[in-house]
Image (cartoon, grey):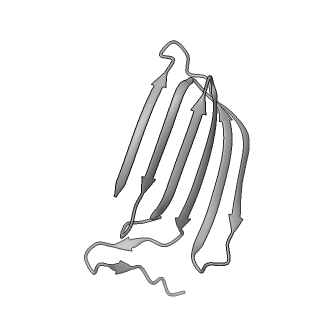
Amino acid sequence: MISLSINIRNPFTNKFRNLYSRTYATIFSNKLINLEFYQDSTIVCFNISWTVCQSHAGLDIEIGLLGYCGHFNFYDTRHWNRRLCCWENYKD
C-alpha cells in the first residue's frame, strides 16, 4: 500500500451531512467507482492511497476544504484470501 494523508479538522464539531453518494459500474470486471460529496468538520484534507492484494484494493482519493469534501474510490469488489494469496471465489 502507498498512502499520503494530510488532515486538519475542527475538534469542536462533529457535523456530517452527505450531499451526494453514487456508485458507478465500469467496463472492467469486478471494478466499481464510488463518488461522494459531503460536509464535515474538515478545514483542510488530502488523502490518497493505492492498495493491492487486499480486499477492495484500488485507488482512493479524498480532498476537502473548509467543511466540504469530495471522495473518489476506484476499487475491486472482491475479497483477498491472505492464506492462499489470491482472490476469493464464492460459489452459489
Residue occupying the point 25% across, 76% down:
83
Tally of numbered tags = 0
In the rendered image, which quarter is residue 57 located in? bottom left
**Residue 76 picture location, percent across and down:** 52, 69
Residue occupying the point 61% across, 78% down:
28
Q: Is residue 10 above or below residue 2?
A: above
**Residue 26 picture location, percent across and down:** 67, 72
Relative depth, front residue between 18 and 57: 57
**Residue 53 picture location, percent across and down:** 36, 70
In the rendered image, which quarter is residue 37 located in? top right
**Quarter of the image containing the N terminus?**
bottom left
Relative depth, front residue between 9 and 4: 4
Which residue is situated farthest in the top direction here? 12
Side of 56 relative to 29 (left or right)? left
Q: Is residue 19 above or below residue 60?
A: above
**Residue 80 picture location, percent across and down:** 38, 72
Q: Is residue 9 above or below residue 74?
A: above
**Quarter of the image containing the C terminus?**
bottom right
Which residue is situated farthest in the bottom direction here? 91
In the rendered image, which quarter is residue 24 located in? bottom right
